[in-house]
Image (spheres, rainbow, N blue to C red):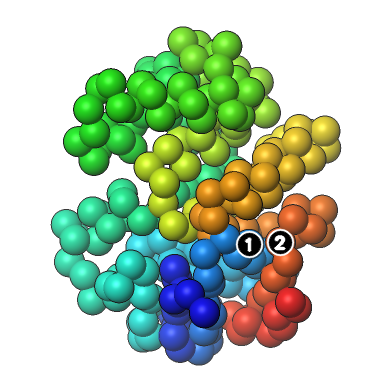
Amino acid sequence: MPAPVLECRSLSKNYDLRPVLRDVSLRLFPGERLALTGPSGSGKTTLLNCLGGIDRPDSGAILIGGGDLTQMNGDTLADLRRRKLGNIFQSFHLLSTLTVRENVEFPLVLLGVSAEERAHRANLLLNRVKIGHRADALPSRLSGGEMQRCAIARALVHAPPVILADEPTGNLDSANSTNILDLLQELTEETTTALVLVTHSLEAARICPRVATMRDGILAEVVA
């Protein structure tokens, strides 16, 4: 049995004394896809933010790459996030002044990868997500589906063991949503990258063999 690429143990988090996460534990192994579903306010996004080191739980541990995110200082945490995590957002979060290729290369710039290697990796992924012909375009010239394809390529370019996706199809029409979900499934299967997908959509959750339902901050159900 391989070691988990991500594990959280007994996470709890309060906002203004209101419990948002209550003793949440989970383990994710290489290549696994886990959907986090549940009503608004149930704690899904807070859990994702804690897993990604954006927010800190009040108690518990989050283990990625042999380190506990909750015990890291700012610089160590930033380095781990650059190397071990990829993020995909509902609103894409592309840098408006950079081209598609430059957006995809950006995580590699932060890691000090050579220009030649950056271009090679970016071109491979852009062709894989079928927007290689848009490599020199600015994000403002892209459709919503193209922007999300760019964001997926950016999330994968540094080969992270874990991708965290927050409602990645929330701003897309049904046809583009289906295409993006199929692409995420294909790419995670090819790379053995693990995926945590926060979604309200049962259609989006279909690509995940594991589905965890959150309610009132509790991981209420896991269906394998």
Figure quadrant of residue 113: top left
Q: Nearer the viewer, residue 67 or 197?
A: 67
Please tell me in which quadrant of the rendered image residue 171 appears. top right
Mark 1–mark 2 contact, CB under 8 Å? yes
In the visual, does 83 lie left or right of 152? left
Q: Position of residue 63 (x, y in %)?
A: 36, 75
Question: What is the spatial separation of the Cα atoms under label 1 and label 2, in whole angstroms?
Answer: 5 Å
Q: Residue at x 57, y 23 (%)?
A: 127
Q: Which residue is mark 2?
A: 208
Does 7 appear above or below 201? below
Q: Amino acid at mark 2?
A: Cys
Q: Quadrant of residue 42?
A: bottom right
Vertical order, 171 against 119 (above or below): below
Q: Residues within 10 Å of mark 2 (few under 14, many from 20)?
A: some
Question: Residue sitting at 62 percent across and 58 percent down?
Answer: 197
Tag 1's secondary structure?
strand
The residue that disc 1 covers is 33
Q: Is residue 213 visible to us here?
A: no
In the rendered image, the quadrant that contains the C terminus is bottom right
